[in-house]
Amino acid sequence: MFTVLSGVNYNISSYRLLRVYKTWQKVIMKEELMPRSRSDPVVKKLDNPLFHSIFTPELNTLAQLFRKYNYQLKLAGGAVRDILMDIKPADLDFATDATPEEMKIMFEKENIRMINNKGEKHGTITSRINDKENFEVTTLRIDTHTDGRHAKVKFTKDWKLDALRRDLTINSMFLDFEGRIYDYFFGYDDLQKRRVVFVGNPTCRIKEDYLRIFRYFRFYGRIAEQPDIHDESTIIAIKENIHGLEGISGERIWNEWSKILSGNYAKELTLKLLECGITRYVGLSENPNIKNFEIVYDTSKKNNISLQPITYLATMLKDENEVLQLHNRLKLSAYERDLALFLVRYKEDKPSVNLKFWKRILIHWKGNVVNARSYICELLNSKQYFSLAKDVEKLVIPRFPVSGDMLKQYVRKGKMMGIVIKELKDIWLDKDFQTNAEELLQEVPRIISELEDKKLEKDNMFLSK
């Protein structure tokens, strides 16, 4: 649909220190032929409990207000899709032919509070009805300029043009308050066939927002009935434009990809993404360990084990440097980063089956022990040690009975304190956590004496050289 002029200039010293300098790209709508569309967009009228369940008193108030001022208001996008799939939508988005200024005048006249004006330049006004419910209403719009992620828009009264700028046909439908479904680009038909395709020209839709590459695969996992029946022109367009991901923030990519890895066909869709050439743009090495990823995924699914999205990516990584490279690109959470580091650190083919080994890690862990237990269980599950993972999950480790204050009369140096505590914890573990504080403190003089002997021996060896 849109012809994109000018380009994106990149100055990349290294991929991990990627800096992208973007210029707005002009979008000329008239140069794309209008895709095949319905002359009469109304395809169905809903009158079922799910449709009626969305009408809260606050929504009814909003609908009456727009009718009073002769503006059209319709439910838009994903909520319409979900209702047609017999799913109650989590969020309701609305579209209207009223401009933002007209909506503001209307709400002010009716003493309706408006909040969060950040979306106004893109046409979105958020109203709060009865101090109970917020409603985001967006003016019909077309894109005039894009940088491959954000768009500058122009408002319109044409519902078809607004539908044309949306990503997928299944997300381009509208629903009015009488239950009529408006479908200009055959999204209803595609939904019945469980077919996921872009509205119009897939290349144009992708260039408007390169994150749509990941959104396509996410919705494919939600909608399609088979793992690999992609529209050929869609995959070609994705491959030809995969470089556009370079300018998309890692947080947004990971937000989409983590949902893909948690959904249907996670393995097949990730393999297809890799086939399309995403590795260099998402922080993976050029040769990720795909075989290991497939083995871990297939085994976990066969045994009905749900692994975390980052675990699947960690199976492809060689070492900690590759984890940090991935983290620098995707901006993982601290938990996800540390889990991935733990998984590659203990990625031996056969982890210890001795429960005491994992108890020792937990009692010496510096940081959140709850997270540490989660890391261990994730590692063991990914290595098919399902029974051992359950044992670790059920472990009850009592509070270590000795505190630093108790040791002050024995140990003066801070570094020595840490060493003594480590030795005491090992004794405590060897006694299966049955040793009390008094018994452990009796061991301190011996531990200090042995440590001092070792230090003296080391000093003598140094002097003899």
Image: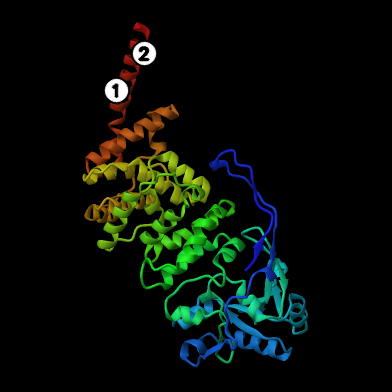
**Sequence-first disc among 2 and 1:** 1
32 is higher (above) or lower (below) than 192? above
The amino acid type of the residue labelled 1 equals Glu
379 is higher (above) or lower (below) than 125? above
- Residue 185 x/y as whole percent: 55, 79
Q: Residues within 10 Å of mark 1 (few under 14, many from 20)?
A: few
Q: Nearer the viewer, residue 208 or 414?
A: 208
* Residue at horizontal 70 percent and vertical 53 percent from the top: 23
Provide the secondary structure element on which disc 2 rests: helix
Q: Nearer the viewer, residue 295 or 370?
A: 295
9 is higher (above) or lower (below) than 122? above
The amino acid type of the residue labelled 2 equals Asp
289 is higher (above) or lower (below) than 461? below
Q: Which residue is mark 2?
A: 459
**Residue sitting at the far top:** 464
Quarter placement of the C terminus: top left
Question: CA–CA distance between discs 2 and 1?
Answer: 14 Å
Rendering quarter of residue 437: top left
- Residue 33 x/y as whole percent: 63, 73
* Residue at horizontal 48 percent and vertical 43 percent from the top: 325
Q: Which residue is mark 1?
A: 450
Q: How is the image coloured?
A: rainbow
Q: Residues within 10 Å of mark 2 (few under 14, many from 20)?
A: few
Q: Is residue 259 left or right of residue 27?
A: left
